[in-house]
Amino acid sequence: MQLKLENHPCFNDSARHKFGRIHLPVAPKCNIQCNYCNRKFDCMNENRPGVSSRLLSPGQALHYLKQAVLLSPNISVVGIAGPGDPFANSEETMETLRLVRKEFPEMLLCVATNGLNLMPFIPELKELEVSHVTITINAIDPAIGAEIYAWVRHEKRMHRDIEAAELLIGNQLAALSALKAAGITAKVNTIIIPGVNDRHVLAVAEKVSELGADILNCLPYYNTKETVFENIEEPPADMVADIQKATSAFLPQMKHCARCRADAVGIIGEMNSEAMTEKLHEAARLPKNPSETRPYLAVTSLEGVLVNQHLGDADRFLVYGMDPATGTCSLIDSRPAPKPGGGQHRWEAVADLIGDCRALLCSSAGDSPTKVLNTKGIEVMVLEGVIEDAVTGLFKGEDIRHMTRNSRKHACSGTGGGCG
């Protein structure tokens, strides 16, 4: 089937009033910290990258997409744009793209990334016919980049200052060249930050034009509280217009960017509808693999009141269910845990033991059990708080991010721990 590339509303101004796009929020982790970014805050009335009212697994994302196209048949593009970086969440991103391509062969596929870890995935992106990729490149001079990025985490190593900027910029420019060699349409986003890179954007435009970029989006910096740049005011409209005019000597300009959320859907510039938001929340309440029947939640607890036990220390799993008639949650079973030892085999036994549970709630968990359980379709959720509040919130699809012990990490608060 011939993909209709002209129907992408972000890359074709004439298409933006007719065709819509949908962003699937399957990528929560980020591998860099920008000094203008804070993903802790999420108001449904704000449009900015890095926020999403819910996170989805690849299976949930496909379910949501099927519902979304019924509500909005004009959706022509499926994109992944966070709320972190797609390739800091490469397994989830690539699996989502595979599922969508198989189910919707006519859809345009699109990814927006910082470019740090893009290069290894370009061959499969081409194979999946991902037609459009956006890279945010804010500087080509490492000295300027060092002012913009607090840290970069690549291949399990932390980098800061000039070293971090050099690594990021080098990977971005190499990936841009590789995208064009693969025949993929490439857009470059450059955020105009007054007093930081506003006089440098022209150099960025010239360089990315040399490497084959197709279109440039010079978008104004968005002031966000509790960031390093929170005291920098947003650029005035005349500054943005002057920069767009100057850089148009090198590349066509995108001037209709709405700084979309990671869960944006519909026509660019329009807010997500209540009906669409409910479909997103409904998908997030499903098991990670929605085709499976997993009606329960498992919990590790020392005394049966709080989520307060490390997964590896659990001697039993408390299993909770919800009565659909009354909406009340209750303890339905207590299952003895497999004996310690045995490595991966123990965690496979745990997965079999709680195979009817869509998630396991614990106070902490190691990488190995988390990976095994996730592979088996059981989400490991690291929480702290009252069991009843957690399980009731999850069954009812409420936002319980305030209970997650790793919420600060996923919010990119600046530590960099574990965000790779």
Image (tube, grey):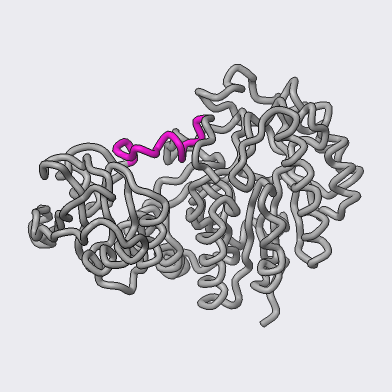
Residue 94, given in percent of the width and then of the height, sits at: 56, 64
Which residue, as the protein is rendered here, is positioned at the far bottom? Answer: 1
Give the left or right position of residue 7, taking residue 417 as reference: right
Q: Is residue 108 magenta?
A: no
At x 63%, y 33%, the residue is 151
Magenta range: 401-413
Residue 332, given in percent of the width and then of the height, sits at: 8, 59
Q: Is residue 71 visible?
A: no
Seen from the viewer's position, the closer of residues 377 and 39 is: 377
Seen from the viewer's position, the closer of residues 26 and 167 is: 167
Give the left or right position of residue 41, taking residue 190 as reference: left
Rendering quarter of residue 161: top right
Residue 153, given in percent of the width and then of the height, sits at: 61, 41
Residue 150 vs 86, above or below: the answer is above
Give the left or right position of residue 415, taking residue 9 as reference: left
Residue 310 vs 295, above or below: the answer is above
Residue 346, given in percent of the width and then of the height, sits at: 29, 63
Which residue, as the protein is rendered here, is positioned at the far front? Answer: 341
